[in-house]
Image (cartoon, grey):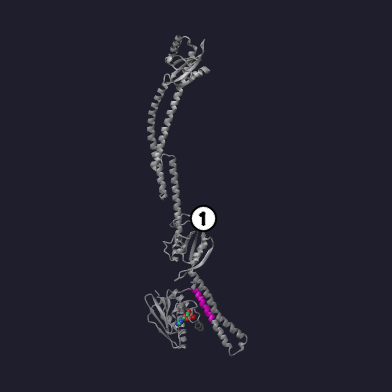
């Protein structure tokens, strides 16, 4: 390319130079010839004037010859021709041997108008001449023509000489011109080549500016402008890539799954959360058809509706079979979207703004939210249910009393006692609920003290002993001496142990056995309440710690249980940094364990 430009420029200059020189040569030859003919004509006019003033005697051959000789001394050829074209005398040729001259243009013109001129080749002398002829009327006889001619040979000499000089000058100019034109075109093509290399560099992302060009001409201006463009491009690309990095960092770190799908239903962008949610390898999904990546039909149809331009789409979608998770999905159509380079296509911009060029889908994990919503709904239903039974009983018995039973000495006291029991149950239920609400709201004010395990067990056993003996259940306490203190809130720890002991008495039949024991390891103390009661089925063992969950609802209600005891106990134990768990076998009995960290 560079060589081509160099040769093109060089040869063009050379051709122009040669053309110019040829034009000068032709023009100067013409001018020279015209000037010479004009001056020859002037000279011939002067001579013909002389000839007319001193005309020859035509009828005297000797005088005519003498006159011709005299006139020829001026350097011109002199010819005298009569009316018929016969040459009467000639200074350069024998008139006897000369042909008839009546057809010569200058002679015909002279006879016709008095004078005539012509520049032509002389057939008599065989050379080029400038002729001027005038008509002369002798005193007697017909008119004759006096013709004078000057040769053009001199001009040819002068022209030849001029040409020679011109040739030498042209050769010198040509040589210098060639050197200069080739040198100039070489420099020019090198500079253009530099600009070309620069634009290649810019295209490949190298924005180092060109050194300033010399001399300061249009090419230097072009280089300057290209430098400026490259600098702007560099700046724009940097700010764009900064922007892009920021956006992709934000998208990457989002817990929500974000996917961008183009109009041809190809996934052009996705963040890590998106591929994790769909269980895909994040490195290989971009550019793939969305139908290959998204297997969930609800999600797929939502994406397709967004691609058709529907706005404000959102729904809950459950993904996963083993561990199903619920996602709140929103899909939004986007108007201008660039497809990823990986898909191998250029930017797709739907200028018509009619049909979207893609869609953005966002998946937000709401599994926990939905679970909590369910728990809340269940809780409200459970609470209402728990309140309903005692309230109905109170209402019923109160109405019975009012409608006359109050004066029935046999039943009135019993009815009032029933009302009191249900009211007590309601009060307990309310107490438990308040306690639970406080614990769950994190408003439980724990006051930690070193608590002695034997004292804790002893105080709770006192209350239990009475209940146990009434049911003929044996209570055994097995606490090793010199146990270290645990760190806890004494009142709350008592609530926990009391609840476990009450349950043990409650769910153990007469003749059973309850054993309270304690053991210590390096970090914590573990207190165990074991009974020989009805036991808990394996499937319910974890659920009994949920609010209101009861294995046998009727039995629990009958005993005044609320179904909240174990839930509260577990919360309290966990607030102490410990654990509460159960091991049980139906028919054989249950063992409840709770651990509390030791006081430092
Ligand atoms: P409740 O007020 O009904 O006792 P809890 O939360 O204390 O509520 O206990 C929940 C359920 O766990 C009980 O209804 C009962 O079915 C079961 N449960 C608790 N302790 C025992 C136990 N020692 N033996 C058998 N089942 C038990």
* Disc 1 Cβ-to-ligand 1 distance below 8 Å: no
Q: Which residue is mark 1?
A: 350
Residue shown at 41%/45% (left/top)? 196
Q: Position of residue 249 (x, y in %)?
A: 44, 59
Query: Mark 1: which secondary structure?
Result: loop
Residue 39 on the magenta span: no
Graded by Cα atoms within 10 Å as few (under 14), some (14 to 19) or many (20 or more), the crowding at tag 1 reads: some
Residue numbers of the magenta segment: 425-439
Q: Quadrant location of the N terminus? A: top left
- Which quarter of the rendered picture does the C terminus lie within? bottom left
Visible in this render: residue 211? no
What is the x, y in percent for residue 341? 44, 56
The one of 503 and 169 positioned closer to us in this rendering: 169
Most extreme residue toward the right is: 403
In the rendered image, residue 391, in percent from the top left (x then y), is placed at 57, 81
- Give the answer, above or below, for where 287 lies relative to 506: above
Is the residue 598 above or below the residue 36 in the image?
below
Assess whether residue 432 is covered by the magenta stretch.
Answer: yes
Q: Main secondary structure of the magenta part?
A: helix
Which residue corresponds to the image point at 51% horizontal and 17% vertical from the top-left? 111
User: What x and y, as percent, mark residue 497?
Assistant: 45, 80
Report the front residue among 36 and 137.
137
Residue 34 in view here: yes
Count of all numbered marks drawn on residues in the image: 1
Residue 425 position (above or below residue 326): below
Which residue is more in the foreground, 424 or 281? Answer: 281
């Amino acid at each position: 390319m560079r060589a081509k430009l160099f040769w093109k420029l060089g040869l063009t200059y050379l051709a122009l130079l040669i053309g110019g020189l040829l034009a000068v040569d032709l023009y100067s030859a013409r001018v020279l010839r015209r000037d010479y003919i004009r001056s020859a004509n002037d000279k011939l006019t002067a001579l013909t004037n002389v000839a007319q003033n001193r005309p020859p005697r035509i009828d005297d051959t000797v005088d005519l010859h003498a006159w011709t000789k005299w006139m020829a001394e001026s350097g011109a050829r002199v010819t005298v021709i009569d009316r018929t074209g016969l040459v009467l005398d000639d200074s350069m040729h024998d008139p006897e041997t000369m042909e008839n001259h009546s057809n010569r243009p200058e002679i015909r013109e002279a006879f016709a108008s008095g004078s005539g001129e012509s520049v032509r080749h002389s057939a008599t002398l065989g050379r080029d001449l400038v002729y001027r002829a005038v008509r002369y009327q002798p005193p007697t006889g017909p008119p004759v023509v006096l013709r004078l001619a000057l040769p053009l040979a001199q001009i040819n000499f002068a022209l030849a000489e001029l040409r020679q000089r011109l040739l030498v000058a042209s050769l010198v100019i040509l040589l210098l011109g060639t050197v200069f034109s080739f040198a100039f075109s070489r420099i020019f093509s090198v500079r253009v080549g530099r600009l070309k290399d620069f634009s290649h560099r810019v295209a490949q992302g190298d924005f180092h500016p060109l050194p300033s060009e010399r001399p300061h001409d249009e090419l230097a201006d072009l280089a300057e402008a290209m430098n400026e463009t490259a600098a702007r491009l560099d700046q724009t690309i940097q700010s764009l890539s900064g922007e892009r990095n920021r956006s992709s960092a934000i998208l990457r770190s989002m817990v929500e799954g974000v996917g961008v799908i183009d109009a041809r239903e190809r996934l052009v962008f996705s963040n890590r959360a998106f591929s994790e949610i769909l269980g895909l390898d994040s490195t290989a999904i971009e550019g793939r058809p969305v139908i290959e990546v998204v297997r969930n039909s609800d999600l797929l149809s939502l994406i397709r509706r967004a691609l058709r331009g529907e706005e404000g789409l959102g729904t809950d979608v459950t993904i996963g079979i083993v561990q199903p998770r619920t996602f709140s999905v929103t899909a939004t159509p986007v108007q201008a979207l660039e497809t990823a380079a990986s898909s191998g296509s250029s930017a797709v911009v739907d200028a018509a703004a009619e049909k979207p060029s893609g869609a953005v889908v966002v998946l937000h994990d709401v599994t926990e939210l939905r679970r909590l919503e369910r728990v809340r709904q269940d809780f409200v239903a459970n609470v209402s249910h728990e309140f309903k039974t005692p309230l109905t009983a109170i209402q019923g018995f109160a109405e019975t009393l009012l409608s006359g039973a109050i004066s029935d000495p046999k039943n009135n006291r019993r009815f009032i006692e029933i009302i009191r029991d249900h009211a007590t149950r309601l009060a307990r239920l309310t107490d438990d609920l308040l306690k639970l609400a406080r614990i769950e709201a994190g408003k439980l004010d724990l006051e930690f003290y070193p608590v002695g395990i034997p004292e804790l067990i002893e105080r709770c056993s006192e209350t239990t002993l009475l209940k146990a003996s009434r049911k003929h259940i044996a209570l055994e306490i097995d606490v090793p001496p010199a146990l270290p203190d645990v760190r806890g809130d004494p009142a709350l720890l008592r609530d926990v142990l009391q609840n476990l002991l009450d349950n043990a008495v409650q769910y153990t039949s007469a003749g059973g056995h309850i054993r309270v024991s304690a053991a210590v390891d390096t970090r914590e103390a573990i207190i165990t309440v074991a009974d020989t009661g009805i036991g808990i089925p394996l499937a319910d063992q974890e659920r009994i710690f949920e609010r209101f969950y009861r294995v046998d609802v009727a039995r629990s209600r009958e005993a005044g249980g609320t179904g909240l005891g174990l839930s509260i106990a577990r919360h309290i134990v966990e607030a102490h940094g410990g654990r509460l768990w159960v091991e049980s076998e139906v028919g054989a009995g249950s063992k409840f364990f709770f651990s509390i960290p030791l006081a430092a």
